[in-house]
Amino acid sequence: MINQGIGTWVHRRRVKSAHATAIIAEDRRISYPQLAERIDRVSEVLHARGIGVGDRVAYLGPNAPEFLEVIFACGQIGAVLVPLNVRLSAPELGFQIEDAGVALAVTDATLDPLLPDRLPRLIVGASYEEAVDAAEPRHREAPVSLDDPAVIMYTSGTTGHPKGAVLTHGNLTWNSLNVLVDYDVTSGEVALMMSPLFHAAALGMGALPTLLKGGAVVLHARFDAGAVLHDIEKHRVTLLTGVPTTFRLLVDHPTWDDTDISSVLKVTCGGSSIPARVAEAFEQRGLAFSSGYGLTEAAPGATSLSTHHAAERASTAGLPHFFTHCRVVDESGADCAPGDVGEVLLSGPNVTPGYWGRPDATAEALPDGWLRTGDLGFLDADGFLTITDRAKDMFISGGENVYSAEVERAILDLPEVAAVAIIGIPDDRWGEVGRAIVVAAPGSHVTHEQIVTHLTGRLARYKIPASTVVVEALPLTASGKVRKHEVRAQHGAPGDS
């Protein structure tokens, strides 16, 4: 069997795009032939350390060429990449590393202390470069099918326990093809990645499709609005992908009006709706947003709303991607009539086969081959999808999903807390931030500072509530579940704390 995976992409592009730039990162420009050779060397480094077909390799670090080198090197030798979120705490990272059975990590030096001591690693920088320089540029291609795992991306859920969504080589390939078809990505694309590649959106909707097509990817290690605007002009960027928070910060930056962004042809946004004033600021520069709906389990694209439909269909999430199918069903599993709200189901070659080591969660999410997204919405007569609610109890803060159950479970470890409900409230900077509605244990006193102190080091900072409200009791159903809609109605205003 030949290697059908993503690990072959750059190697095949080295001739077709021999004179083209693949990656731009600060003062580094890496051509496709140069990237292909480095990937071959990295695959040799991994092989020499015992990494082979099916082994898991973690990457912990900001956007950098090394991330892309490692993901393609893993693809060449049949290993599986586990991208780790740099904003997570050491216990959160430790859980994911243990759950995935990671054999080796490639990590940034500043983040290395967060990893378990026992875990073998390569440190990006001198030791990584020494190993790569010493390796032979031998091209390895393990037998890999489109059904084999390429990446494991962790996502939390209603239980609060992270699950590793397995994305196969086929999932990533077909998602990239969806992007090429629906967003008209070209070989002349210069795509700036201002969101982290450890998220499915930046990787699947930006970097991978661009490299598959033979364009250039501009990597920013961390988001800085001024630096993004500078590089748009310097590198003549054509494609921007991000979340509402990043686009708002671009518009609010002092150099926005003076920056030449005439090269930009496409701006795509996910996560939540674009604020009207941000959309208007881009419209004044001749640009309209493409948006859509997706989730990690779909690698991540599910639907897209093109600029052609943005005006008259602004309230929708668009049409299903070209190779993706969408249904909306009622509680009995029957298809809803157009306009009727039900649960959104997805199917297609970009949809995950399941969760790593979690047959129970896989069976629950994919009982018949259709992914139960847990989101509520409806299809209109033309097939446009509108999302009406997240059935999963979560909110989005600065582009990061925050699952209430995970935060609630951590807060309940405080003996002073008898009950807690986490909700998202509007925030000008982050879109939403968390608020803890807390019932103190009998005879105890609870403060916001106590909760922050307790969660610091246990959870990522973006998951820690920005405010706390102490109440005598939470509204409950007859079965004892919290009535979240009542909690949101009473405590969901920004100033209500």
Image: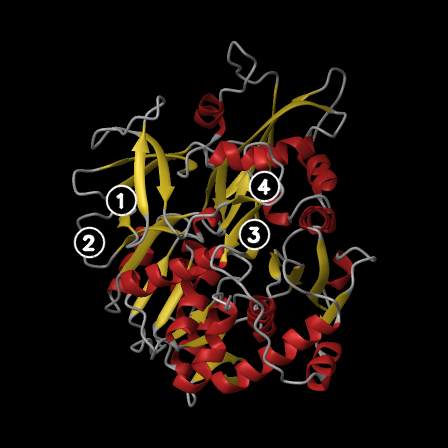
- Amino acid on which disc 1 is placed: Thr
Q: Which residue is mark 2?
A: 309
Q: CA distance from mark 4 to mark 3?
A: 27 Å
Q: In front: mark 4 or mark 3?
A: 3
Relative image position of residue 141 (x, y in whole percent): 56, 72
Structural crowding at the residue carrying mark 4, measured as other residues with C-alpha within 10 Å and reported as few (<14), some (14–19) or many (≥20) = some
Relative image position of residue 401 (x, y in whole percent): 51, 45
Q: Secondary structure at mark 2?
A: loop
Residue located farthest toward the right when viewing the structure as drawn: 118
Please say which color scheme the image uses.
secondary structure
Q: Which residue is mark 4?
A: 466
Structural crowding at the residue carrying mark 1, measured as other residues with C-alpha within 10 Å and reported as few (<14), some (14–19) or many (≥20) = many
Say if 191 sits above or below 307 in the image. below
Q: CA distance from mark 3 to mark 1?
A: 27 Å
Please name the residue shown 78% across and 59% down the image: 119
Q: Earlier in the sequence, mark 3 or mark 2?
A: 3
Q: CA distance from mark 3 to mark 2?
A: 31 Å
Please name the residue shown 43% across and 88% down the image: 18
- Amino acid on which disc 4 is placed: Ala
- Amino acid on which disc 2 is placed: His
CB atoms of marks 1 and 2 within 8 Å: yes
Q: Is residue 163 rendered to the left or right of residue 16?
A: right
Q: Secondary structure at mark 3?
A: strand
Q: CA distance from mark 4 to mark 2?
A: 37 Å
Q: In front: mark 3 or mark 1?
A: 3
Residue located farthest toward the top when viewing the structure as drawn: 478
Mark number displayed over residue 316: 1
Q: Is residue 38 rendered to the left or right of residue 118?
A: left
Q: Does residue 17 appear anywhere in the picture?
A: no
Q: In front: mark 4 or mark 2?
A: 2
